[in-house]
Structure formats: structure tokens, C-alpha cells
Image (tube, grey):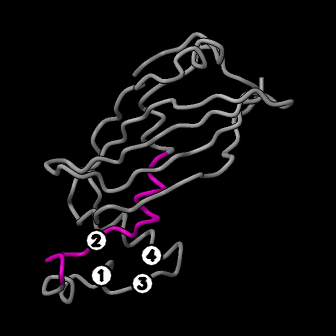
């Protein structure tokens, strides 16, 4: 975990790789809960028997489930000692799903602070995420997220 004194110290790290989260195992229980929450019950996610004979040999996490893990994992990468009044998810510039996360695989997030824009409300931070899969060369996804940090 990398600790910054405040937002200005984080901003000064623009262009740096901030670190990696811990590994998180993606369980069938998590996949099933995501299916319930979103209504996406496609067999490749929730039907263990059918998925065993499918293209991946097991169930796979929803792409959006993998994407939704980024805030949880990012919270393990860096922190601010002096917290801003609020941080707002401002959206995504780009997301690419490069390969599926099979049930039981472990993933972690690697983060780089790629951009900082001063706005009238605060700093708009652009972070590049690589959701790595343990034992795999290619990441599950790469994403460019935007966060507005309000002092």
C-alpha cells in the first residue's frame, strides 16, 4: 500500500506506477451474486454443468463483474492520509476486455496515474488499470478510469 500525505502529493506522482493490489480469487458465489444483482444469468456464468463442456471448461466472471472489482482492488493500492472532502467516480474513457476470468482464478489490479486535470471543482485524475490474472500473460482487462477529487 502506497501512502500519500494528501492529494497534492498524489498528483505529483503523475506518470508513475502506483502499485498492485492483493490477489483476489473470483468465486462462483461472487459470480452468482453478480448475476442476481444484474439479471445476467447467461449459462457461461451460472450453469456449472453446461459451462464445463463449453469453450472455457468452467464458468467465467461477467466482464462487468471484473470491471466492478477495480474500486475494491484500488483501495489496496494507495491511500491518502489527509482525505479530501469527497471523491467521485467520473466515468471511464476506455475499457477493453482481453480475456475472461474463469471461476477460481485470482486477479489483481495494477494502477498507473496517467493524467491530472485541474478543474473548478478539484483534480480530475486519470488512472490506467491492468486487471491481471494469476499465471496468465495477458490481463483480463485494461481500463482508463476518471475520478474527481474534491478538496
SS state under label 3: loop
Q: How far apart are labels 1 and 4 at the CA level?
A: 11 Å
How many numbered circles are shown?
4
Q: How far apart are labels 4 and 3 at the CA level?
A: 5 Å
- Highlighted range, magenta: 55-70
Residue plotted at (52% across, 81% down): 39
- Residue 75 screen position, x and y as percent: 48, 34
SS state under label 4: helix
Q: Which of 22 and 115 is in front in this view?
A: 115
* Numbered circle sitting on residue 60: 2
Q: Nearer the viewer, mark 4 or mark 2?
A: 2
* Numbered circle sitting on residue 35: 4
**Which residue is denoted by mark 1 in the rendering?**
44
> Sequence order check: which comes first, mark 4 or mark 2?
4
**Which residue is denoted by mark 3 in the rendering?**
41
- Tell me, yes or no, whether the two marked residues, 4 and 3, touch with CB atoms within 8 Å: yes
Q: Which of 106 and 143 is in front in this view?
A: 143
SS state under label 1: helix
Quadrant of res 56: bottom left
Image quadrant occupied by the N terminus: top left
> Sequence order check: which comes first, mark 3 or mark 2?
3
Residue plotted at (35% across, 35% down): 21
**In the image, is residue 68 part of the stretch drawn in magenta?**
yes
Q: Nearer the viewer, residue 14 or 41?
A: 14
> Sequence order check: which comes first, mark 1 or mark 4?
4
- Residue 14 screen position, x and y as percent: 54, 22
Amino acid at each position: 500500500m502506497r501512502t500519500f500525505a494528501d492529494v497534492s502529493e498524489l498528483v505529483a506522482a503523475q506518470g508513475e506506477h502506483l502499485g498492485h493490489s492483493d490477489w483476489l480469487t473470483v468465486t462462483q458465489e461472487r459470480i452468482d451474486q453478480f448475476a442476481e444483482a444484474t439479471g445476467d444469468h447467461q449459462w457461461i456464468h451460472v450453469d456449472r454443468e453446461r459451462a464445463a463442456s463449453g469453450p472455457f471448461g468452467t464458468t467465467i466472471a461477467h466482464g462487468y463483474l471484473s470491471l466492478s472489482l477495480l474500486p475494491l482492488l484500488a483501495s489496496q493500492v494507495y491511500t491518502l492520509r489527509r482525505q479530501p472532502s469527497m471523491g467521485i467516480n467520473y466515468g471511464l474513457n476506455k475499457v477493453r476486455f482481453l480475456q475472461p476470468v474463469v471461476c477460481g482464478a485470482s486477479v489483481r489490479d495494477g494502477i498507473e496515474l496517467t493524467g491530472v486535470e485541474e478543474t473548478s471543482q478539484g483534480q480530475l485524475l486519470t488512472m490506467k488499470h491492468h486487471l491481471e490474472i494469476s499465471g496468465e500473460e495477458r490481463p483480463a482487462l485494461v481500463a482508463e478510469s476518471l475520478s474527481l477529487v474534491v478538496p
